[in-house]
Amino acid sequence: MTYFLAFILLIGPLIFIHELGHLLAAKLVGVKAVRFSLGFGPALARVQIGETEYRIAPIPLGGYVTLLGASPDEELSPQDADRALRNKPLWARYLVLGAGPAFNLLLPLFIYFAFFLGHTVVAPPIIGTVLDDSAAAASDLQSGDRIVAIEGDDIHAWQEMQDRVRVAPGRELRLQIERDGVRFDRFVTPRKSVAKNMVGEHEARGLLGVTQWVYAPQIGIIDTDSPAHAEGLQTGDIITSVNGEPVETIEGLERELERSRDGALRLTYLRPQAVRGELGRYLWFDSYHARLLPRHERGQSTGLLPANTFVRTVEPDSPAAKAGIAPGDRVLAVADRPVTRWETVAVLLDRQGEQPLALTVQSPGQAPREVQVTQEIRSYRGLYKDARSYLWFGAEPYHSRMTPPPEPIRGRFTYAMRSALTTTGSMLMMMWTTLRQMVTGERGVEELSSVVGIFDVAGTAANQGWAEFLRLMALLSINLGFVNLLPIPILDGGHLMFFTIEALRRRPLSQRAREIASAIGLVIILLLLLIALRNDVMRIWMD
């Protein structure tokens, strides 16, 4: 029952909006609308308002608007002849038939506007971590820098910054940076990266090489002869102060260690301990103190290293385990490229795919060694039971991290409108690309879904909450608008195709030609519906 109600709440508004577009356009140009129906079959309820009968029917798989003179052979009374659709100018018929799909394509704009208007805070454009050998590192950007503007345009949110950088691969950008209250300009050229988008096409993207999060001052220890190891510090400990000065990030820890490199260090640190209680397993942090004296013969080394490239866990029988990587190991290089951040490791692993890759790793107290890793492809089903896959490495690092607190949105109305336009535009482009791929054969028909599939995803989205449900409605609305614009007879796009042929020929198609075309269109639609139904049944059977 829950799934059925979710299904009705999902497709009901989409059908209503579509038919409302036809109805309003018809009334605007003076075409008589005889009937407006939500659903098919005999009327469950009906009411006559003016010249139009409004009804609700029991089969909730569509709806229709009966327009006077829609059929070329319909008999018309003399007093209604000028109100028949077929007697209206070509532009008016285009408007009436195109309004339904147009309303479906516009609906997501309002859904996303309402969605973003509900946002009160956004992630600020503050750099958390600068990655190895990145565009940001080459331009001396640092953790804590705020990106105030790009090419003179104000930047208020992290997503705005990402959007501007993504569309500028290889093109120099002027960034205004605020650091410690001082503003200055930096010229940065985002690195070009080619990646697959949501519809599987390769596209060039600009990468700045920064992350939003900052890492906690969590340490790793590889030298078992170091002062840190001698004092009992362990990989995974979190330093909270150095010589009485509090530290909050790994960059802050590195600065404090550099500042105090010639003298003794007084450290306060936390060590996480796994504790099992009544509410389950959780971490308890014990506080400790240590005093370190850097060893001159080792270059003033204390043995304290950032924990981000240290391996915390390795899954049994994973590619990492097969290569001999163990918890506590440190990744020094990937394909002879030195790394200081696990994000760089992840990027290089992703680029390599299933091909063997050499990693330089080091275990505590041992010399560095080289291992060969061959990642595996793993498959799973997404939220809506769609097939997905990912590369499996099988090792995870220490990554105690945090993001800066969100900030209030300045100008919520303009933010909501701008975000709605951007999101709707990207969804329209995605749907257009998907349809083009299906027409050209780049994408198979096994991805088609019928009403059975919509029934299932409606219930799934409803269980995730209103936000997910409305996002699904926006996506299906775009889908419905695009499908109805396809030049297939019996669809709105098919009628628009007939009008276009009429404009080119200066006369309408014969009734026989229209009947043949409509029969072909019906066969195409039925064939696609059968394929979609088969796909849904197979997905359900596999689950």
Image: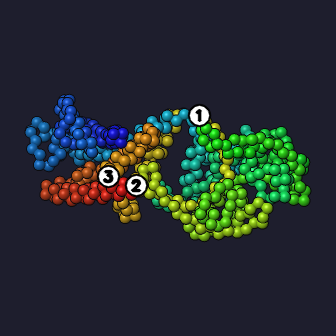
- What's the distance in space between the residues labelled 2 and 1, CA to CA? 43 Å
Q: Earlier in the sequence, mark 2 or mark 1?
A: 1
Within-10-Å neighbours for mark 3: few <14, some 14–19, many 20+: some
**The disc label shown at residue 408, or none:** 1
Within-10-Å neighbours for mark 1: few <14, some 14–19, many 20+: some
Q: Which is nearer the eye, 456 or 40?
A: 456
**The disc label shown at residue 450, or none:** 3
Which x, y percent locates residue 72? 14, 49
Of the residues shown, which amino acid type is indicated by label 3? Answer: Ser
Residue contact between numbered discs 2 and 1, judged by CB atoms under 8 Å: no
Q: Earlier in the sequence, mark 1 or mark 3?
A: 1
Identify the residue shown where x is 59% and y is 68%.
Answer: 374
Q: How is the image coloured?
A: rainbow
Identify the residue shown where x is 79% and y is 50%.
Answer: 233
Of the residues shown, which amino acid type is indicated by label 2? Answer: Asp
In the image, residue 6 sits, relative to residue 449, either above or below, namely: above
Element at label 2: loop
Marks 2, 1: nearer the viewer: 2
Residue assigned mark 2: 543
